[in-house]
Amino acid sequence: MFKKNPSNDASRMSPLLVWKRPFALWLLPLIFLFLATTLPLLAERNFWAVSAIPLTTFISLVVSFILAHHFFSFLHSQEKSDFYFSLPASRTRMFLSLNLSALVHLLGPSLAMMAVNSLLASLFSKADASIPWFSLSQASIWMSYLGLLVRLLYFFFLLEICYLVTDKSVTANIMFILINLFWPLMLFLYSDAASQMLPGFINPITTAVEPTAWMVLVFQLFSPVLFTGGLNRFILLTGLMALAAGFLAYLLFRRRKAGYTPGLDSINWPFQMTQWMGVMSLTLLGGYTAHYLRILTSGSLAAPADVSPAPFLIGSGLGLLFSLWVFNLFAGKGKIVWRPLLITLAATALPFTLWLALVMTGAGGFSSKLPPEGQLKSATLHYEDIYVTTLAQYDRPYTLVLDQADDLALFARIVQKTVDPGNPGLGIPRTLSSAEQLREHIRLISSPPGYQDDYVYYYANDIQFSLETKSGQILDRSLLLPLTVHNPDYLQLIRQNRAFYLAELSSYGAYAKFGNDFSLIPTSKASSLERETWIDPLIKALQADDYLSDTVIRDMISRINLHLLDKGQGALEEMLEKAPLLIRVSLTIPRGMEADPGDYELLLPVLPQEIPSLENVVHYALGIYDNYLSDQEGKDSYYP
Amino acid sequence: MTKEGDRHKELAAMPGTAWVFRQALARTRSIALFFLFLTFLAMPVVLLIIGRQNYFDLTSYMPDSLYMDGEIYANPVLFPLHLITSLITVASVYLMSGAQFRYLFQMKTVDSEVSLPLRSGQQFLGRLLALMTSLALILTLNAAFTGLIFYQWDLFSHFLDYLRLYLSMAGAAFQLLAFSLVWYTLSGTLFDAILLNLGLQMAWFFSILNVLSMSGRLGSPPSSLLWLLTPAAGFITDFIWIRPLAQDLIPLVFWLVLSWFFFRRRPSERAGIRNGQLTWHRLLQPLFALFGGVSLGRFVYLLFDDLTPIFQSPAFYLGLLAGSLLGQFVSSVVSGKALRKSPWIHELLSSMAGLLLFGILAVLVHLCMTPPVNPW
């Protein structure tokens, strides 16, 4: 009745060849996953919830290497590849069958153990609620596992690509390990070195509060083992990358010649690509090692004013020689091969020298370039170190825009002080200590006059800012600015711009910039109930402990400030009208500075019901005070 | 007379140990030079970058590095440099010995080497001498340049103080070299030789540490048992417990004689055969059963029954039994044994031998060693 289609036979791959694999491929991962994840669960050890996924990840990564070798090493054997490619099956069918079998072997054991563990956890596990990170929910564990599966797929397909573009299994594995190692190292080292030698340059890797999608894409491209961004996030992006890698593997599998003989038909470009990454990374790593070896053994914690570039250059030279040598030995099977050595030298030394020449000469005044006077349209300040405790989360970037001419003039003068040509950090040739030298100079000039020479007073973080000119040009920089009350321009700026003063007050570094006194003042709007339940206890609590007082009030100021920023102009006055409690902020004017303390007095409204998370801060302070009182016999608890 | 002279010339022209030595030396010349460069980078070059003043400042207030129970036999600058040099030396031992003996693992190369008019003793001795010469040159030149720097800095006494630790490292390197040769001559593939070499040392080191610790006999220094099958441990432990020269020399001679013995009896047909398919491999597997048993036994004990004394804990013995079976199974899989063809009774017996070894070790440790005195 049904006519047999001969083409179906032609694309049939023997199930025996695809599925009949050593039972150890299932058994060993299952045993190790059982030992690492199920046994702690059965022993009712609460660390199971946090250790299960990392241990599953480790075991799965090891299994990936074994499976890639088991399923795809036939590509590197003349006899085996002749056999496989002479089977009456299309390349597409063969690719799909082999990958399906490999992925079932890779994901099956961990999926089975996750299911068993979940079942056991719901039956036996007693989560310790007092340790929140020990009692992760099943849903969050499964979410992490889903993220792991997607990342494992990308990891496996990239490893398979390495098998498909090389002529030996050893080369494939070494290439995969090396690109996983060198790619992120190269990205990190070059961006970091640029930001150290060109003060002001914003290093996107170290300044990002958390990984962005493009960072995940770039880092994972050649380094899936890093799991950039964590397991729970960027699942869709990684899934797309896995799909793309799978498709590329398919194309390569279709185009793969059957007749490669290891050692005779050499495929060079994967090795050359790995070599290029390795030589570029190790050259700069050599420079880093020598430079910091010299600096760190000098015994001084601060960057010296005069730093020689010689150790960096010697270290880079030795790093270049070492990396060229080691890759050449690898390619020449233990013997030096001169011609490829010279080609690689040219391909790496040239871009490295150009890059080095650019950054060591200051990239045409990159760090000190400022818009001409009067041309500044606005300055946007990005605060990364806003005072946020675990009591309240703030997940938006905190920015402040200065657009008034007098504010901009003062801010430009503050920036100019940092990028003054006399700053040793801007001397030529630049070194890896240039940015630190620049900071050290700013710390010294920001310390009170006559302060001890060997102890720096001013510790604050670099601040990111964007300067926009009237012609539309934007300069993005990250610098340590002399933002202290010992700087008259800064003192003037916080006097004339209250939003700026509040922003400065809300940052972690505020204590290093100015000295403040805080006091809590109940207003006539406070009801007797409010006085009794939280206002008076709060005042007593903060009077009892200076450290608690400082922490809690700074946290409260930060909450109020962020709320005011959302509400816009006019909100402060409105809230002051109805607040039952006020915070009075007074500034201590340092000796020698001419300023009226009254100009710097701030009144801020404490409205726990209206300002998000402020109630948490108040309860936190009262809770601590309550504990303190409970420790003392015969005293009543204030906290309800 | 002329005939006699010609005969001598002919004999002299024939390849012998010296010829093998020269060939072998040439074979690893590039690698040896590279490792010399690496050791230079790790010690003399680093010292030059640090500079005399920085070195002097760092070492003048603390002449020796400290660890929790005492001192390390190197100052704070030389200690990390020594650590890196040790790692480089370990790598050089493995790579150079692998390069000299890798011909044993391919049928084509074995055939061509065996067909040379050389006795197997000459082949072995020539290669061994070349390896030892390369290693000795690397270590000596590195020490000489380091010593020269200290001499120039007028701090030669620092070098003399450190030399004791350096010589101990050199002893450990030669011992590791001899130990490695045993596995190169016994194994069928390079991969298996390296894996077995590393696996055996790891299994022995951690098993003994565990047995000593469980018996309350882990003192400072620990028992000499620790170094019996773990020459690489000397690179790490010598910082704290420098061993007498004999402790390096006796095993060195023993491993060399053993490797020479195995090399002479090695059949050419062994090339390319996985270790799991070779008979002698079964004799070593109890060590992996011991490692698996002790590790899993302790793990299960810590998870389920850590309040009971370990030797009275059923959880420990259950873990010990399961671990010995697992250790045996993993070692069989990794070494390429055809498990489907191997009688299960052999596997079981090997696991039981691992358990027996544990029992013997535990009893010996209890009987022959006294618990260390707690200084607190």
Image: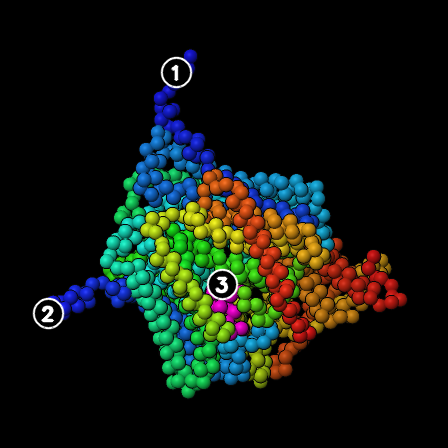
User: Looking at numbered disc 1 in the image, what kind of residue is underneath it?
Assistant: Lys
Q: Which residue is mark 2?
A: B2
Q: Is residue B297 magenta?
A: no
> Which quarter of the rendered picture does the N terminus of chain A lie within?
top left
Q: Which is nearer the eye, A418 or A42?
A: A42
User: Looking at numbered disc 2 in the image, what kind of residue is underneath it?
Assistant: Thr
* Residue B325 visible somewhere in the drawing: yes
Identify which residue is drawn at 42% across, 80% down.
B51
Identify which residue is drawn at 73% across, 68% down.
A549
A437 sits to left or right of A48 = left
A634 sits to left or right of A171 = right
Res A564 quadrant in image? bottom right
Res A315 quadrant in image? bottom left
Q: Which is nearer the eye, A162 or B296?
A: B296
> Which quarter of the rendered picture does the C terminus of chain A lie within?
bottom right
Coordinates of residue A348 in the picture (x, y in percent): 32, 61
Q: Is residue B233 magenta?
A: yes
B361 sits to left or right of A415 = right
Subunit ID for the residue under disc 3: B
Dot 1 falls on a residue whose secondary structure is loop
Dot 3 falls on a residue whose secondary structure is loop
* View extreme (top): residue: A1
Discs 2, 3 touching: Cβ within 8 Å: no
Q: Which residue is mark 1?
A: A3
Q: Which is nearer the eye, A9 or A181?
A: A9
Q: Nearer the viewer, mark 2 or mark 3?
A: 2
Discs 2, 1 touching: Cβ within 8 Å: no
Q: Which residues are magenta?
A: B226-242
Q: Which residue is mark 3?
A: B230
B105 sits to left or right of B159 = left
